[in-house]
Amino acid sequence: MDEWMDLNAQAVQQAAQRLAGQAVRTPVLRSAAIDAQVGAEVFFKCENLQRVGAFKFRGAYNAIAALDEAQRARGVVAFSSGNHAQAVALAAQIFGIAATIVMPADAPAIKKNNVLGYGARVVNYQRLSEDREAIAQALAREQGATIIPPFAHPDVIAGQGTAADELFSEVGELDALFVPLGGGGLLSGSLLAQQGRAPECAVYGVEPEAGDDGQQSFRSGVIHTIEPPQSIADGALTQALAPITFALIRRYARDVLTVPDSALIQALQLVATELKLVIEPTAALGLAALLQGRVPVSGQRVGVILSGGNVDPAAFAHYLTH
């Protein structure tokens, strides 16, 4: 697969133009206490305050905006249990087109209701016995619709990259940037933005220790597939990178790091007390790597992308008092 060969910083700029007036230009926050704790100037890009509560809106909207009118008229199909499902449903609503979202039968009711509230149709599947991608492909064939995958798509990747692009444009060049890593859409897009805005910046992907497929793949040079991982970072529980995200990460990332769930809880608590923000565990991956001292950043200017804020309130309360 050579889709990534045509992807560059210009694709991110094109996505930024499409997203202007649609995506929230999320704030960049600082904390003197966190700076003192890690010994660096830390800039937090708050994508928990994005539409649908996560960076996913950027990629979903950009991918639908890139379709021609005939394609849009036939609708879109997506498969996701959470943030991507809501992002595609909202983007489709904005364009006034049909969206079908394949979701696990046991997905949280709040997420399903949000998808339905945006006007999309939900098709349930059994997570343990059915293949969601096969179901989505069959639906797309029936409807003549276009599949908008969660990360393995050039326009999705370029859209996600606009978060890092905004961060670089606002705060200037950084020495390092820490990005949550699941399927690799956000990290790949961030790397494209880095190539255009801050070529000297070292970009690190961060994933949960239990789901280290990205680290294994990055360090070995071949895509590794792992058993379904268990971590509170539910947005990063992919089993393997896609060829397109792997190619971009392998080429441009400095390294892929991992952190334990205990470090995610510590980072969640710090963000809540110092930045007064609600974030989901996956969004805490980058800060957790800093707190764990995974790479030396003393005296540096460091960016951290807080990828989303869609966390169950009871679970969040538990993490805060853990």
Image (cartoon, rainbow, N blue to C red):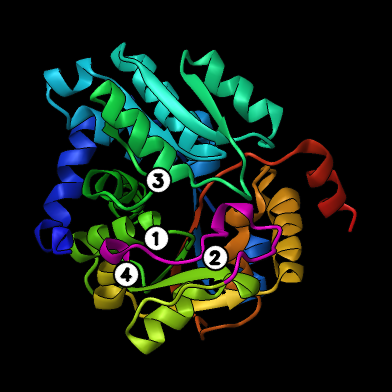
Q: Does the magenta stretch include residue 231?
A: yes
Residue nearer the viewer, 308 or 131: 131
Identify the magenta region. Answer: 227-245
Q: How far apart are marks 1 and 2 (CA)?
A: 14 Å
Question: Does label 4 or label 3 sit earlier along the sequence?
Answer: 3
C-beta proximity under 8 Å, tags 2 and 3: no
Residue assigned mark 1: 184
Marks 4 & 1, CB-CB < 8 Å contact: yes
Q: Distance between the residues labelled 2 and 3?
A: 20 Å
Q: Marks 4/3: CA distance?
A: 14 Å
Q: Is mark 4 on a helix, strand or loop?
A: helix
- The question of residue 167 being in magenta is answered with no
Q: Give the residue at x 31% y 61%.
A: 188
Under mark 2, the amino acid is Gly
Q: Quick one: SS at disc 3?
A: loop
List the residue tagged with mark 4: 246
Answer with mark 1 or mark 2, whichever residue precedes in sequence: 1
> Which tag is nearer the camera, tag 1 or tag 2?
1
Q: Do the residues labelled 4 and 2 touch (CB within 8 Å)?
A: no
Q: Position of residue 164 (x, y in %)?
A: 35, 53
In primary-sequence order, the first of circles 3 and 1 is 3
Q: Is residue 16 above or below residue 121?
A: below
| Residue depicted at 26% across the width and 74% down the height | 252
The earlier-in-sequence mark between 2 and 3 is 3
Query: Tag on residue 150?
Result: 3
Where residue 286 is drawn, which disc sits there? 2
- Spatial distance from mark 4 to mark 1, Cα to Cα? 7 Å
